[in-house]
Image (cartoon, helix red, strand yellow):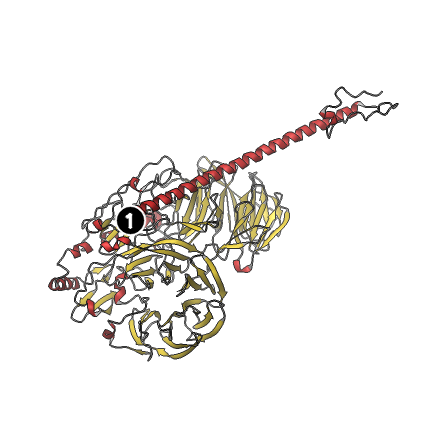
Amino acid sequence: MSEEPPQGANNRMFNGPGGYRGAPKMVLGASPPPVTITKVFDAWNEMIENENQSLRDRVADLEKKVHEQTDEIMCLRSTLADVLRRISTIEGARALANNHAGGRATPTKDTVRLRHNNSDSARDVSKRASSYLPGRSPSSTQIRRGVHYQSTSSLYSDGHSSSSVSPAPSPSPTQANNPHPVHTARHTTPSPSPFASPARPHQLGVLNKRWASTSDFATPAHHQYHHLAPSPTPTNSQLARRPNSGSLHNLNHLRSSNSQLNLSRHGAKEAQYNGEEGIVKMYLRGRPINLYVPTPMRETYVPNGPSSSPPAKLKLEWVYGYRGRDCRNNVYQLPTGEIVYFVAAVVVLYNVEDQMQRHYLGHTDDIKCLAVHPNKLLIATGQTAGHDRRDARSWRLNPPSDPLSPEAEEWPHIRVWDSVSLNTLHVIGISDIERSVACLAFSKADGGSLLVAVDEAPDHNMSVWDWSRGERGYKLLETKCSADQVLAVDFSPVDRSTIITCGKNHISFWNYESGMLAKRMGVFENRERPKYVTSISFTDTGNVISGDSNGNLLIWQRGGNTVYKMVRGAHDGPVFSILVQKDGGIITGGKDGRIVEWDRDLERTGNVIEIPEQYGSPRVVTSGRGSQLVVGTTRNCVLGGTFTFPLRPVMQGHTEELWALAPHPGHHQFLTAGYDRTCYLWDTMAHTIVWSKDIGEHAQSAAFSNNGEIVIIGTTSGRWFVMDSETREMYSQHQDGNEPIQVLKFSPNGQYLAVGSRDNNIYIYQVSEDCRKYTRVGRCQGHSSFVTHLDWSADSQFLQTNSGDYELLFWNAGLCRQIAQTSQMRDVEWATQSCTLTFATLGIWPEGTDGTDINTCAKANQMDLLATGDDFGKIKLFASPACQQRARCLEYGGHSSHVTAVGFLQDDSRMISTGGRDTAVMQWVVSSNSSSSHR
């Protein structure tokens, strides 16, 4: 029996692509084909399936649109934050310009730091960690700190934040004459939201500049919160109000009274001045050093008299380098387009497209870890202990009385800060974290309300914090994590209470409930147990993916602690990084130098990136804009690119201890070299590397010829190379002893080269053939220790040199003979000022110094400005000559290791500093201090 097609055979469900298509067209005289009920049911089922599939497609499209709108909202928030930041910067610059026009001081966001109390205890000369007081910005929970002009006799201060966006304040002429220091206690101003735009200067309380005595300031108990007690030492202003400077009798009286002080401060004696002979005697570690006062100053010189303020100030403009050699998960792309990473004690926010850097400068020592909040605006960074606290075992028993004091800032801690305003919001973990913060992570499932941290104590303690509760956060719990090294920690994106840690010989699954943590160790069953679980990440379903030192990838199911799936040989060696993308795809990076793409089922897609050996292995791989990847490597490089387009360097840096620095004499360029055997020529305007060269040996020193065409590189083996500064062609090499070449310097007339060696000698060479040929003239012998610094006289006839045992010797360069009558050299004009022990640098030495604290010194080419770098990561600016004892200075931080070299570009527009073991190169803008003329 056949069935007639139903009414409405033209209906979509019968004529559609998957339904009953109706009866074929009738041919004249033909009968219709038979239709069975089964075909009708099949057509209905197919139609329903098509409708279901269409519904699923529409739901998927809606979900995709929701995700896109979520991303757009995030981008809009970030863009708004970036706009607010730019508006704040413009307003600050406008206010600064207006105040400068009116001759008044302006509160700014600079990097000037307070000096800490020096100790006479033994210090590690090879590396001095920084322990300066970091800047704090106004926020809902933050109290404002001061920018200081530092000296022993006087202190000049102003408010600042931990940003390097704006320059240091200009001194006020009216306040400079105020003999009585008035310190206003810092206060907290409530704010409705941590994302509120930065307060304007008039909202930040009393920011008037202040004078104070450093003898009070050097004591930790006298912090800025508290009113400083009167100083027993006369201040500069008090000295200035003593007898009239025009009266020779009164000056002699003041000089003799100062000569009789000879007081012991922290084991150091006051300088003594003999006016009859024109000799000032200073002491380093009890050893007297005679310095001859220039003839024009003999009648008026007072060793403890008032000193001038530096005529310029610094602003951190650019930081070259990245710490990837021993840190993980420390590169992220923010929605604003900035890449955030750290090196030394600086967090860098680098906008590659705009070629602009911003810097968070709140830390006081090496930053070891970084975490980005789910809102992509807040950032948490953890630092190591300061040098004085690094080996202390009783630190928990003696916590600082003031958690925000300079002493407390030396302790390991975590800082939560706003990436837009660079304001510090919370300082967490002071006296709770031991040695260093190893790794950090914000919670994800609850919007980032919790923060987990693991320190580097012997038991690697793990603590969970309600970070937003109060200024210092609130520690919910703390437990011992593992006796072995912990490499990573992370919260589950779907389970608020799940935390994963991994490291040497373990992967641990933690469950946080009712204020307690329950721990389950990962079970590998019959699979090979790796020595290290090197990386972890979560899929969107909550499964855990781990990579290990054997190059394997393992999947651990959500809620379990056993292996669900294993991929052997994903990499040839340890898996350093695992990135799970939004679409579920997975990207891994390993020690083998490869970046591999996988689908969500851990099947290879065939996309692989081979990183060139010169850049190192991928330490961290993170998502950039669109399909771009941002990669941090083990050789301290940050790379950017895709699987289609090759990776290119975004930032490069040195990988080992850095010592050599040579500014170019004619261009805005400078050269650096270090123990990584690599020389870099940098362009300060383009912020890029002009060229690099592997010299095959550890570099210790460098110098450009006067015309800039030749560069000399000194090594630790006593060998030095002559190289073309443009083509990098090696013209010759020379050997002077077997000890490191400490210093190299051409004479002002370009006819001689002085080579200072660690074998206590200075070798003099005659230069010819456009600085390509060198003939030894002789050797200057007389130092009892290694040569540290040297300067040529302006007429190229004489040398002055310092040594490791605090000697200051003078030489006739042409004869290579020591000048025994040093008084004859008092009026010699010196072409440079790199020697740290001279009359012109008497004031750069702080109280209690041991003679090795100051590593480097440089005078500006056209300004009366002197810069120094010390063992505590600090850079100081002085007026030149700094001949008054403990002269007034500006102090800046950023380095976390000993500052090995400072130098000014040929036009004094910028100053360069190099850190030793922090491997960082920092570029500072030198801006004239317009108000210095008022003092």
Residue at the location (64% across, 29% down)? 55
Name the one closer to the observer, 873 or 203: 203
Tell me: residue 33, above or below residue 373.
Answer: above
862 relative to 179 in the view: left or right: right
Seen as rendered, the residue at the extreme left is: 249
In the picture, measured across the screen, residue 660 lies left or right of residue 265, that is right
Label 1 Cα neighbours within 10 Å, binned few <14 / some 14-19 / many ≥20: some
Going by the image, does 240 lie left or right of 797? left
Residue farthest right in this picture: 29
What amino acid is at disc 1?
His
Residue 693 appears in view: yes
x then y, percent, for residue 697: 47, 68
User: From the viewer's perspective, is residue 121 above or below residue 514?
Assistant: below
How many numbered discs sit on the rendered protein?
1
Read off the residue under disc 1.
Answer: 100
Residue 558 spot, x, y in % from top left: 56, 39
**Which residue lies at the image location 23% right of the left edge and 48% below the top edge?**
210
- Whole-percent x, y for residue 878 in the image: 28, 59
Query: Left or right: 550 with respect to 485?
Result: right
The quarter in which the C terminus is drawn is bottom left
Q: Residue at x 84, y 21 (%)?
A: 2
Residue 419 or residue 798, whichever sits in front: 798
Q: Is residue 495 visible?
A: no
Q: Helix, strand, or loop for circle 1?
A: helix
